[in-house]
Image (cartoon, helix red, strand yellow):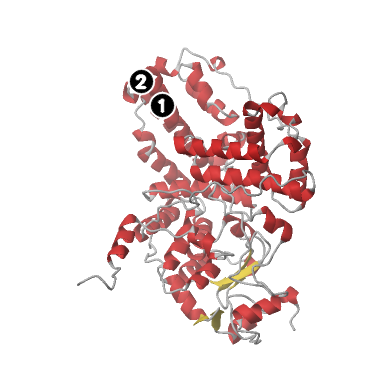
């Protein structure tokens, strides 16, 4: 028997927490973002920009966390799982290629193994690569003249700044674009666009008719000056309005205060932390429990005399939880609350009380018999066309300050459905150049491998080959922030109809796989999901496609 330490499962995924939570982008810029772009060190090309990425995959319920029940009943070892679900019913067949390295010698496996086996769905590695390469019908632009950062800033001037109607704002942004790096310029354009709209509404004038005096409303500045970065730039804009001076503007950073919560909440958060819950997830729980306790103090008489940090958790009853559920449902029905957000929020509140019950902190499980808020977890996303995808990579090639790295990062997301956390952990030694496949580590610590399709291999070959080290050279949050910003810029240049974030490319990858001749089980493994319910959230069809397919359905009783 092989040592289990040397066995690595591919196409079997753990529950990933695709964090799409936005950190405030107002706190991201330090003084270095205000320096001239010519002085920006090339080694700092990937600065930290706290920007949000894309959507979270559903967390397991608290019962799964506590009992950790395997979905493969009766299987007690990795070897048994391989024998039953990959190689057949109990028959060892070590030569079957499951898309992963079954020994530490990946090159040897690649030479000796040719077949993939997925619960009876067998096809060769070459056939799998062929499927992946047929997902997109795009071509690589040749003889593209790279314009880099300066070209990108000129694009901002020609296509964004020029469309602003207020002349004082246009003049200021053109001047600043010659001094700031492209990241700062882009965010300033977005903020001044918002400012122009605010001033227009406050003065009841069209933006084109705004004059200097219209911009001198201190209250309007308070809405847009939310960080030191914006303060410094708006102060320069304000100073431009002679004879007014910079001293007329003030900015006082808001102090961050730790939210005081009751001992029961602190015990819950400590327990979750020991269970391995990530800091972002803990902060989410902290925020949502504070929201629930604040509502309880304001609405429920039994808690009205308590400050939030003194609320006795043991006094909560099932009726209180039902009342809160009704409150959320009415909020959704009135349009005040989002359906999907309310569903997840109520699940988290139930998780809190159920966990406290299992911990012995409260005597009764007040969640018993209370169902979750009903709704649809599915959220439709726009799927770009081949032409839009081609235009996107053309924009990267032409305007990126690091085109090879960016094409590689977005290529992994598009052709293999990589998450940003998987990109951040990817190392050069994980890439097998001889058999053209990549081994990577997911959030849950599992190691997977997939063959590399030729378009992605072409991007890799454009890079300077390295022996070891991180491919992208930064941590997950840094990489996610930078890719989110660049994705927004390049999809704008490529004129996509809709663009959410880099995680959209993973949705594109899985949706395109469904258009090929792959079974649901194979699709689940290529998506690296635990269950098809999760995979189904990544499949999108336009109204036209659904209508066309519906027309193809025929029934026996229909007469031709």
Relative to 368, 238 lies left or right: left
Report the Cα–Cα distance between label 1 and label 2: 9 Å
- For mark 2, what is the residue? 210
Residue 357: image x %, image y %? 75, 47
Task: Kindly identify the residue that appears in the image at 57 percent across and 64 percent down.
Answer: 529
The relative height of residue 514 versus residue 103 in the rendered view (above or below) is above
Task: Kindly identify the residue that appears in the image at 69 percent across and 39 percent down.
Answer: 317
Residue 398: image x %, image y %? 42, 53
- For mark 1, what is the residue? 196
Outermost residue, left side: 560
Few, some or many residues within 10 Å of mark 2 (<14, 14–19, 20+): some
The relative height of residue 347 versus residue 30 in the rendered view (above or below) is below
Secondary structure of the residue carrying tag 2 is: loop
Outermost residue, top side: 243
Q: Are marks 1 and 2 in contact (CB under 8 Å)?
A: yes
Few, some or many residues within 10 Å of mark 1 (<14, 14–19, 20+): many
Residue 159: image x %, image y %? 36, 40
Task: Assign the N terminus to one quadrant of the image.
Answer: bottom right
Secondary structure of the residue carrying tag 1 is: helix
Q: Which mark is residue 542?
A: none
Task: Assign the C terminus to one quadrant of the image.
Answer: bottom left
């Amino acid at each position: 028997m092989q040592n289990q330490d040397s066995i690595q499962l591919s196409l079997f995924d753990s529950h990933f927490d695709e964090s799409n939570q936005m950190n405030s982008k107002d706190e991201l810029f330090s003084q270095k973002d205000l320096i001239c772009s010519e002085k920006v060190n090339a080694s700092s090309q990937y600065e930290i920009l706290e920007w949000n990425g894309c959507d979270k995959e559903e967390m397991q319920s608290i019962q799964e966390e506590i009992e950790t029940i395997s979905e493969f009943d009766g299987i007690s070892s990795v070897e048994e799982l391989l024998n039953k679900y990959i190689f057949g019913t109990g028959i060892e067949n070590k030569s079957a290629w499951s898309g992963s390295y079954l020994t530490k010698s990946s090159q040897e496996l690649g030479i000796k193994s040719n077949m993939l086996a997925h619960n009876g769905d067998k096809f060769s590695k070459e056939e799998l690569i062929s499927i992946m390469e047929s997902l997109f019908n795009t071509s690589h632009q040749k003889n593209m003249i790279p314009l880099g950062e300066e070209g990108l800033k000129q694009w901002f001037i020609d296509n964004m700044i020029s469309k602003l109607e207020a002349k004082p704002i246009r003049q200021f942004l053109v001047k600043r674009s010659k001094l700031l790096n492209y990241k700062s310029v882009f965010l300033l354009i977005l903020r001044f666009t918002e400012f122009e709209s605010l001033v227009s509404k406050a003065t009841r004038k069209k933006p084109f008719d705004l004059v200097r005096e219209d911009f001198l409303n201190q209250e309007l500045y308070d809405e847009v000056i939310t960080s030191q970065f914006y303060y410094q730039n708006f102060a320069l804009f304000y100073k431009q309005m002679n004879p007014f001076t910079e001293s007329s503007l003030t900015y006082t950073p808001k102090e961050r205060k730790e939210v005081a919560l009751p001992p029961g909440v602190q015990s819950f958060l400590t327990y979750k932390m020991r269970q391995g819950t990530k800091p972002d997830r803990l902060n989410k729980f902290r925020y949502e429990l504070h929201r629930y306790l604040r509502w309880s103090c304001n609405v429920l008489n039994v808690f009205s005399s308590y400050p939030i940090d003194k609320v006795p958790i043991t006094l909560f009853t099932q009726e209180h939880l039902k009342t809160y559920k009704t409150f959320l449902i009415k909020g959704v029905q009135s349009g005040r609350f989002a359906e999907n957000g309310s569903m997840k929020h109520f699940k988290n509140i139930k998780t809190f009380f159920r966990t406290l019950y299992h911990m012995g902190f409260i005597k009764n499980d007040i969640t018993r018999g209370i169902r979750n808020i009903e709704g649809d977890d599915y959220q439709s996303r726009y799927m770009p066309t081949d032409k839009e995808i081609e235009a996107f990579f053309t924009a990267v090639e032409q305007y990126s300050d690091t085109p090879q790295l960016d094409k590689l990062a977005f290529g992994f997301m598009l052709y293999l459905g990589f998450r940003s956390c998987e990109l951040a952990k990817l190392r050069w030694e994980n890439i097998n150049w001889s058999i053209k496949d990549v081994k990577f580590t997911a959030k849950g610590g599992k190691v997977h491998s997939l063959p590399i399709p030729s378009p992605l291999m072409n991007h890799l070959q454009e890079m300077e080959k390295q022996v070891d080290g991180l491919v992208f050279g930064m941590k997950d949050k840094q990489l996610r922030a930078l890719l989110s910003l660049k994705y927004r810029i390049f999809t704008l240049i490529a004129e996509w109809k809709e663009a959410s974030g880099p995680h959209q490319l993973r949705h594109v990858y899985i949706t395109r796989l469904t258009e090929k001749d792959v079974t649901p089980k194979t699709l689940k493994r290529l998506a690296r999901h635990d269950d098809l319910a999760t995979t189904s959230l990544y499949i999108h069809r336009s109204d036209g496609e659904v209508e066309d397919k519906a027309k193809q359905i025929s029934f026996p009783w229909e007469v031709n």
